[in-house]
Amino acid sequence: MRDGRLSGAIFPRAGTTEADHEAALEEVARLWGACSGTPEGDRLGILATLIDAWEAEHEPMDPPDPIEAILFRMEQQGTVRKDV
């Protein structure tokens, strides 16, 4: 990050750093709620896509266990096995 701006103008470049990622997250927080079709909304969409791609590469998540996912959803909905 230079001068409070994301390196590479909006974050896309080879070798993007953790600091760039953090700055992009801060920018998304600032832009949150921007209307689509506006420059701010467009920037928000681009940053969200880039952040998603960066996190998929640098912080991958294993898919959830199917049974655990079902049990979690049941808990959220307040259902029990008998309800299913």
Image (tube, helix red, strand yellow):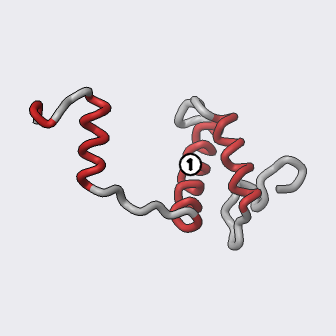
Q: Write down the quadrant of residue 77 in the picture.
A: top left
The relative height of residue 73 versus residue 6 in the rendered view (above or below) is above
The relative height of residue 4 versus residue 61 in the rendered view (above or below) is above
Q: Where does the image place residue 42, in percent across and percent down from the top left?
A: 58, 43
Q: Nearer the viewer, residue 35 or 15?
A: 15
Number of other residues with Cα within 10 Å of mark 1, as a class: few under 14, some 14 to 19, many 20 or more:
some
**Horizontal side of residue 70 vs 1, given as left or right:** left
**Horizontal side of residue 40 vs 35, given as left or right:** right
Q: Write down the quadrant of residue 39 in the picture.
A: top right
Determine the residue positioned at 81% across, 50% down: 5
Q: Which residue is mark 1?
A: 48
Q: Nearer the viewer, residue 48 or 81?
A: 81
Q: Where does the image place residue 38, in percent across and percent down from the top left?
A: 60, 35
Q: Nearer the viewer, residue 48 or 41?
A: 48
Amino acid marked by disc 1: Ala
Q: Which quarter of the rendered picture does the N terminus lie within? A: bottom right
**Horizontal side of residue 84 vs 14, given as left or right:** left
Q: Which quarter of the rendered picture does the C terminus lie within? A: top left
The kind of secondary structure element at disc 1 is: helix
**Horizontal side of residue 1 vs 26, given as left or right:** right
Q: Where does the image place residue 16, in percent across and percent down from the top left?
A: 70, 66
Determine the residue positioned at 63% across, 45% down: 43
The relative height of residue 15 versus residue 81 in the rendered view (above or below) is below
Residue positioned most to the top: 78
Q: Nearer the viewer, residue 3 or 61?
A: 61
Q: Write down the quadrant of residue 35 in the picture.
A: top right
